[in-house]
Image (spheres, rainbow, N blue to C red):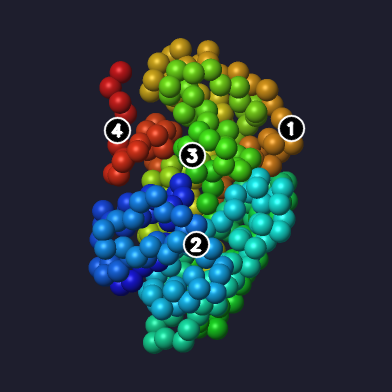
Amino acid sequence: MKVLVTGAGGFIGTKVVEVLRARGRIGESSITALALADQSLAWVPAGALALEGDLGSASALARVAEFAPDVTIHLAAVPGGAAEKDYALGRRVNLDTSLALFEALAVRRERPPIVVYASSVAVYGATLPEVVRPDTPLGPPLTYGAHKLACEILLADFSRRGLLDGRSVRLPGVVARPREPNGFASAFMSDILHALAAGERYTCPVSPQATTWLMSAWRCAENLVHAASMEVGADPARAWTLPVLRLSMGQIVDTLAGLYGADRRALADYAPQPALEAVFANYPLLDNSAARALGLADDGSPEALVLRALATRYPPPLRRRSQ
């Protein structure tokens, strides 16, 4: 099985590559060739093919077509905050390049190539019901979410036509991203973990009651790899929201205090920004039974989520640290 990972040099992409290398297979099929695509790649495993440069360029797409992957995990994207500020960039990368990639992969073969598309919970509206279910109407409040939803629809159409075997998985807040400018308006979800774990003061831009849907990057990578082998049935939408842990910022602080010391609670201050909280920290309950039935999973507990989120190596720890 030949596997392509786009956005392979990014926060989640590097972890997907680590999971693939550690397992050496997807489902029951061994990985015989691995290709990594990104603007630049700081590290490429021995034997892997590096596809550096603009994925939307004709030359890059020709190399993708020549590689002819059996599975593509498509992560390459401009993050939400950056896409909102620069519409042209967001459209070119998040929409136009994704469509061009789908077209490059959609060459008639005996078995359609599998495409796992990293969509986002940004496809939901800013106002949500008490419980989000698989049939909850979608209404992205930002351009980033609109482009993600458009790609979900396009990938489902390629699948309907028998050209691709698409699986869109909607990513929640994925932590803990590096502490650097990254264009994510939701960066506070990661920053609070880094700061309090290190014993540093942190001012949170949402209230302690604000709720988020969270997943560690390692669990996210595992879910993306699993999505390539799961039996999806006849669902025409071919899109699933990943199972999550729904936590308030206060619960996150309490979890960090339990793991790293009670003094962490005093290090957390709050300066809520209503507009930010309305979009990124006002999430209700989620009915993810359909995704769980396919074998997708959350981190299991707040403690496991924090430890896995802050782990730098795979596999991440599964147990609480000793006090």
The tag on residue 177 is: 3
Question: What amino acid type should be assigned to the residue bearing mark 4?
Answer: Arg
Callout 1: helix, strand or loop? helix
- Which numbered tag is attached to residue 319? 4
- How far apart marks 1 and 4 lie (CA) works out to 36 Å
- For label 4, the crowd category at 10 Å Cα-Cα, with few meaning under 14, some 14 to 19 and many 20 or more, is few
CA separation in Å, label 4 and label 2: 40 Å
- Mark 2 or mark 1: which comes first in sequence? 2
Residue 149, x across and y down, in percent:
64, 62
Q: Are marks 1 and 4 in contact (CB under 8 Å)?
A: no
Residue 101 visible at all: yes
Q: Nearer the viewer, residue 32 or 138?
A: 32
Residue of label 1 = 274
Name the residue that disc number 2 marks. 53
> Is residue 134 shown left or right of residue 112?
right
Q: Nearer the viewer, residue 276 or 322?
A: 276
